[in-house]
Image (cartoon, rainbow, N blue to C red):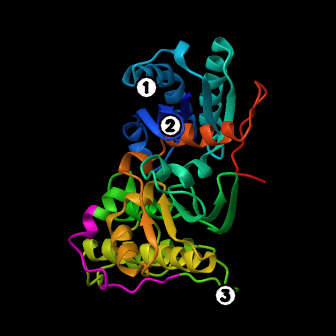
Amino acid sequence: MLVLGIDTSCDDTSAAVLRAPREVLSNEIATQYDLHAAFGGIVPEIASRAHAERITLVVERALVKAGITLDDLDAVAVTHRPGLVGSLIVGVAAAKAVAMARGVPLVGVDHIEAHVVAAMAEHDDLEPPFVALVASGGHTSLYAVRSEGDLACLGATIDDAAGECFDKVAVLLGLPQPGGPSVSRLAVEGDPAAVRFPRYRAKDGSLSFSFSGLKTAVLYFLKGPGGKRDAPDREDLGVSHADVAASFQRAVVDVLADRSLEAAAREGARDLVVGGGVAANRELRRLLAERAPEGLRVRFPSPALCVDNGAMVALRGAQLLAAGRLDDLGLDVSPTGRA
């Protein structure tokens, strides 16, 4: 079965072709970094217009790379939640058009669930049950994957996502977007022990995350108590921006690694899977490999499957189709995840 996967959940326009169950034949992504750089974050109206301009070309590229045409497709999978509503509408409209024109099944995919299973495209021996961390610009969540049809959320951020926090700290440090790679590159030159930034732990023992306090701690460290984002750095900073970047990054990955390993222990998991844009962070990969107990395998997708992409959507769509899940042309979009 050949499945076309489409993702326009945020600012990347992506389409991919997957030969079920796991063979990725193509995975095309058009980014919008240049369009949003001047604003220090994603502008929803700009994102949706760019998706509308690019979606046809990106789908065509995916088909050409896979060596097929629309007539060869057996199904279409598309992200319909969560995400920016205007962006999601573009992808869902394109998927509906293909499904209707070619008379093939349509299935809507939850974007976070797609990140959860992304690593399965590259690890043939990875099967449920496993625990998954999804850490990106919009989401930070832990899931217990007990079967392909049973994904249970174990904990999620109560405020900012990890990737969002990276982006905002990058602005404070005067670094370009996307913030995650920029902060990580600068952090290589710094001392992760230079500043002791706070690590959140829920008082009720839950596996939740919180990064708003960390973001504020970096702001006040750089600008002084009550400082504003556009204020100059305080004169008695005493450390370099590289030190701040390294210390901040260590605080984020400390929390991500600790909660993930705790979740794996609670579930008795043999595999810990990490997905989302922050999964590409080298310090997180190093820390998890260093701290993982014997018998726990830590699995990461390649960088191309860490970012938002159509391949993971096609993979999750193929799983849903195999389980008998179908949607009709009334498929709607939602800015939030599962109820």
For the stretch drawn in magenta, the main secondary structure is loop
Instruction: Give the image location of residue 113, x and y in percent.
Output: 61, 51
Mark 1 packing: few (<14 Cα in 10 Å), some, or many (20+)?
many
Q: Amino acid at mark 2?
A: Gly
- Give the spatial CA distance, label 2 vs label 3: 38 Å
Mark toward the viewer: 1 or 3: 1
- Indicate the amino acid at tag 3: Lys
Q: Nearer the viewer, residue 44 or 262?
A: 262
- Residue bearing mark 3: 203
Q: Is residue 309 left or right of residue 328?
A: left
Q: Foreground mark, 2 or 3?
A: 2
The answer to which image quadrant residue 268 occupies is: bottom right
Which residue lies under the disc numbered 2? 310
Q: Is residue 281 left or right of residue 52?
A: left
Task: Give x and y (percent) for residue 265.
Answer: 57, 80
Q: Quadrant of residue 68?
A: top left
Mark-to-mark CA distance, 1 and 3: 47 Å
Q: What range is drawn magenta here?
A: 185-199
Residue linked to disc 1 = 62
Q: Position of residue 207 (x, y in %)?
A: 63, 76
